[in-house]
Image (cartoon, rainbow, N blue to C red):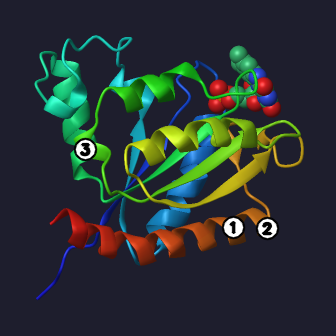
Amino acid sequence: MATSKPVLEVIIGSTRPGRVGGAIAQWFYELARAHEGFESELVDLAEVNLPLFDEPQHPSRQQYVHEHTKRWSEIVSRADALVFVIPEYNHSINAAIKNAIDYLHVEWRYKPFGLVSYGGASRGMRAAQVLKPSLVALKMPYAGDVTISLPITPVVEGVFKGDEQLVKAAGVLLDELARLTPVFQALRA
Ligand SMILES: Cc1cc2nc3c(=O)[nH]c(=O)nc-3n(C[C@H](O)[C@H](O)[C@H](O)COP(=O)(O)O)c2cc1C
């Protein structure tokens, strides 16, 4: 009998027109699809199109009044593991990613996550370090990261090709997610 694989959602964190985040997420998503441990999905926050957080109740109650929140809740509920592809803005995270995270609560809990961060010399690491405590507060276990320097490995004509080192780092992250995911699926059950 065929058993279904865990769902890994790769989230495009930047919503900026002209962003490079879409190309970087596409690169990681293709590596995730080639990994036998997951059924992978690409989720674009620009398409999810959430307004600034506008739910009256704390998300832990799941008493959502807005259709956009219900749709977002359904998307994240499907995930067994997540990878957030995030830019660094002003030595921190971009607003859209924090906003999207704050909308939900239970949907994130006990789901392993990885970070793919990018930027200049910092490789987006300051953004990653800012985001991590919020995800840990939501009881998400951290599986690792991939950090990308855009000056060294740029997006060219809308396409990102990670070098050997980045492909290896992505593989390490996917393997670690694959190790953690069944453990936390069992915990959620
Ligand atoms: C508002 C803003 C602030 C930025 N701040 C930083 C920064 O602090 N560190 C950094 O390495 N790059 C910074 N950058 C450059 C981004 O890394 C670069 O523009 C990248 O393409 C942004 O990701 P995106 O195109 O997917 O939105 C900033 C870019 C923007 C638009």
**Residue 133 image offset from top left, x and y in percent:** 54, 42
**Residue under the image location 39 percent in, 41 percent down:** 43
Point out the frontmost of discs 3 and 2.
Answer: 3
Q: Secondary structure at mark 3?
A: helix
- Marked residue nearer the N-terminal end (3 or 1): 3
**Residue under the image location 57 percent in, 56 percent down:** 28
Relative depth, front residue between 106 and 157 = 106
Mark 1 touches mark 2? (CB < 8 Å)? yes
**Residue 89 image offset from top left, x and y in percent:** 70, 24
The circle drawn on residue 169 is 1
**Disc 2 residue type?**
Gln
The circle drawn on residue 165 is 2
Up-down relation of residue 51 to residue 149 (above or below): above
Relative depth, front residue between 15 and 84 = 84
Q: Secondary structure at mark 2?
A: helix
Residue pointed to by mark 3: 107
Regarding residue 157, the answer to whether it shows in the image is no
**Disc 1 residue type?**
Ala
Q: Residues within 10 Å of mark 3 (few under 14, many from 20)?
A: many
Q: Residues within 10 Å of mark 2 (few under 14, many from 20)?
A: few
**Residue 40 image offset from top left, x and y in percent:** 38, 59
**Disc 3 residue type?**
Glu
- Marked residue nearer the N-terminal end (3 or 2): 3
